[in-house]
Image: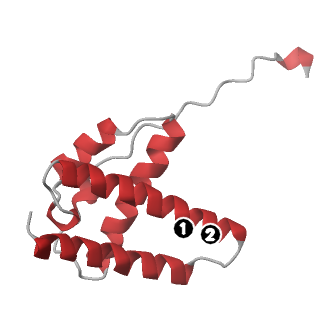
Amino acid sequence: MSAKTSDVGRRLVLTYEKDLWSRLPRSQRGVRVFEYQRRALALFVAWLRARGVELHQAWPEDLLEYRGAIRGTARTRLRRFEAVRRIYRFLYCNQHLRHDPSAVVDLPPRAKALKNPRRQSER
């Protein structure tokens, strides 16, 4: 991995973070959302780099593998992968990337809601 390649990925991440920060409200919730997105993105970039792939070099197969590697609750897996899809959608729509590898990858399955065990007569 060359320094130039690493710089390109870092620049793309900073571009996304600046845009995200400019769109979020300056409330406690907005700051929490921003920090969560940053952490989720940092985990993804670290995972890619461990495999010798940069953010702008990833393919759908890489994202499928990452989707399976995410640990945590169903909600955590969904939120982390949504963060990955969001950056790729942003980079593609703003012409920083020629393709969006996340466009063809489905989200992780959602947790199924538990049915209310109470019967109609108990209500």
Residue depicted at 53% across the width and 59% down the height: 36
Give the Cα separation between the discs numbered 2 and 1.
5 Å
Label 1 Cα neighbours within 10 Å, binned few <14 / some 14-19 / many ≥20: some
45 lies above or below 90: above
Label 2 Cα neighbours within 10 Å, binned few <14 / some 14-19 / many ≥20: some
58 lies above or below 11: above
Residue depicted at 74% across the width and 23% down the height: 116
Residue depicted at 22% across the width and 59% down the height: 101
Q: Nearer the viewer, residue 30 or 94?
A: 30
- Residue at which label 1 appears: 34
80 lies above or below 111: below
Residue depicted at 39% across the width and 50% down the height: 81
Q: For mark 2, give the secondary structure.
A: helix
Q: Nearer the viewer, residue 48 or 103?
A: 48
Give yes or no for contact between labels 2 and 1 (Cβ–Cβ under 8 Å): yes
Give the x, y percent position of residue 4.
12, 76
Q: Is residue 71 left or right of residue 123?
A: left
Numbered mark located on residue 31 in the image: 2
Q: For mark 1, give the secondary structure.
A: helix
Q: Quadrant of residue 45?
A: bottom left
Identify which amino acid the numbered label 2 is placed on.
Answer: Val
Tell me the quarter of the image containing the N terminus: bottom left
